[in-house]
Amino acid sequence: MKSTPINPKSEHHRINRQFASDNYAGICPQAWDAMQQANTGHTPAYGEDPWTTKATDTIRNFFETNCEVFFVFNGTAANSLAVSALCQPYHSVICHETAHLETDECGATEFFSNGTKILLVPGSHGKVDLAEVEKTVKRRSDIHYPKPRMLSLSQATEVGTVYTADELSQAGELCDRLGLSLHVDGARFVNALAHLNTSPADLTWKAGVDVLCFGGTKNGMAVGDAIVFFNIDAARDFEFRCKQAGQLASKMRFLSAPWISMLENNHWHLHAANANRCASILETKLQQIPGVRLLYPSQANSVFVELPPLVIETLRSRGWLFYTFIGVGGARFVCAWDSTETDVEALAKDVQQAMNNPDSQPASPTHGTTEDPS
């Protein structure tokens, strides 16, 4: 990402927390403390340490089932390797046309699966239309067509909406009927979980999910995703895929230890609920501003609105960083684990002022472009 620092001498308020991505936030205290506690003496490497063993068991308890767990550095690796485990090169994976798998993985899915094709389907509010999924599967069955093998869903979606347990169960039933595996890109899974206030089991294996890429970074961890295989057979030899892809951390304890504290003590919920709450407050405040149009309901920690181009320029000139190319356009504001109502009020106030009088704002922006779409 290329970025120009915000000018601290700007006549406008200094911005401490941004809304471009929850990746911008630092490490939460609980994750930091867990890593510090793991930083004691010598211990076996490559996942043979007691922290990784306990983290794996903690995740199993969290989902109330036996499952295979692998810790990797990031979501791109998690998604791509999960697909490669369930798909052959002649297979295809079906996902929403705005899915991260398609738009923001730089072809990693195809690369790690040696050519598995991605087939796109539409659907309102960032969710796949299951009728379109079935149509795509049944469109052709000849040898010249990449055989559909997997359905991938984003939870929460790329536009901040959430699949309910019933919607996931419907997807699971369809996959079972059509012979598809069900993969969930859960970069913001905990935000969806906090919004629905249901059990992790109900949003995964009970609904027919075979593999979940469980995001930790956006919930306050320093680095890392957990790949959770509810379909145990699909995880056979998966450790070799991780090693070959450069995802087997030698000092694995620093990837795994934070999961223990975050899940055992419900810190995941504390941080996800706060991010969701701030997004809900921002949604309410922006809806009250004449001329601002909400594009999608805010069900997790993101708010998508349509703003006039001059207002977008004005906000950026004041130092605000946010994206305007995710989903189907508009502006996306994302709240993080450490967002506060004060941050939200400051942003909403600037939106209000910019909508009222955009011409009075400075013309030279004090920020750079944001290129990381996560």
Image: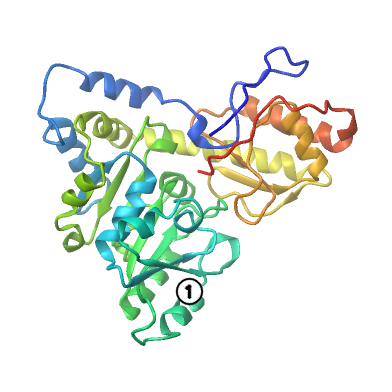
Residue drawn where x is 50% and y is 78% of the image: 131
Give the x, y percent position of residue 45: 13, 31
In the image, residue 65 sits, relative to residue 290, either above or below, namely below
Name, please, the residue furthest toward the top. Answer: 9
Density class for disc 1 (Cα within 10 Å; few <14, some 14-19, many ≥20) is some
Dividing the picture into quarters, in which one does residue 261 lie?
Answer: top left
In the image, residue 156 sits, relative to residue 258, either above or below, namely below
For residue 60, say whether it is visible.
no
Q: Amino acid at mark 1?
A: Leu
Residue linked to disc 1: 130
Q: How many marks?
A: 1
In the image, residue 50 sits, relative to residue 131, either above or below, namely above
| SS label for mark 1 | helix
Q: How is the image coloured?
A: rainbow
Q: Is residue 129 left or right of residue 346?
A: left
Give the x, y percent position of residue 206: 30, 62
Dividing the picture into quarters, in which one does residue 202 lie?
Answer: bottom left
Looking at the image, which is closer to me, 74 or 294?
74
Residue drawn where x is 32% and y is 62% of the image: 209
In the image, residue 135 sits, relative to residue 212, either above or below, namely below
Give the x, y percent position of residue 96: 50, 64
For residue 135, say whether it is visible.
yes
Looking at the image, which is closer to me, 58 or 353?
353
Looking at the image, which is closer to me, 113 or 130?
113
Give the x, y percent position of residue 336: 52, 34
Q: Is residue 269 left or right of residue 73?
A: right
